[in-house]
Amino acid sequence: MSGLFAGTSLERPVTCEHCNNESCACPKDAKGNACPPKSQSPRVRREKRRGKWNTIIADIHASPGEGSTDLKPLLKDLRTRFGTGGGLSESETGPEIVLQGDHRDEVVSRLTSFGYRAKASGG
């Protein structure tokens, strides 16, 4: 792997500005830019769909992991943690994670433990 000033005495490997690591593990958004959890502010709300409560996580771009650009690892963790079903959906504002049941407060605390600046929204 070539680095900065390749071929000179000043050669050094390229490191990530967020994690200071050669092999960056920061999550990436759709454009390929690094977006660590601390720079994301997802909103967690609950909605009633078809007569049942659902927990919706919006404004989240990528989940932490080995260069992960999708939300599937985070979805799997949340479904396993709360023992519920769920999936990914697209909205006008971007991808959303949908969990079955009312888990808003628990999801906010779980996302906060991962480093996200999550907030509960709605009533």
Image (tube, rainbow, N blue to C red):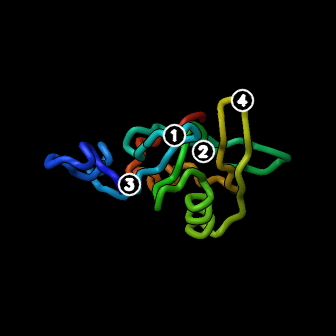
Is disc 2 surrounded by few (<14), some (14 to 19) or many (20+) residues within 10 Å?
many
Is disc 1 surrounded by few (<14), some (14 to 19) or many (20+) residues within 10 Å?
many
Q: CA distance from mark 3 to mark 2?
A: 26 Å
In the rendered structure, the answer to whether residue 14 lies left or right of residue 44 reads left
Of pointers 2 and 4, the one earlier in the residue sequence: 2
Q: Mark 1 = which residue?
A: 42
Residue 66: x %, y % from top left: 46, 61
> The residue under label 2 is which amino acid type?
Ile
Judge depth for marks 1 and 4 and give the one in front.
4
Q: Residue at 37%, 58% (x, y): give it.
A: 23
Q: Mark 4 = which residue?
A: 92
Judge depth for marks 2 and 4 and give the one in front.
4
> The residue under label 3 is which amino acid type?
Cys
Can you say whether 3 is above or below 77 in the image?
Answer: above
Residue 72: x %, y % from top left: 62, 58
Answer whether labels 2 and 1 touch (C-beta < 8 Å): yes
Q: Mark 2 = which residue?
A: 57
Residue 19: x %, y % from top left: 30, 51
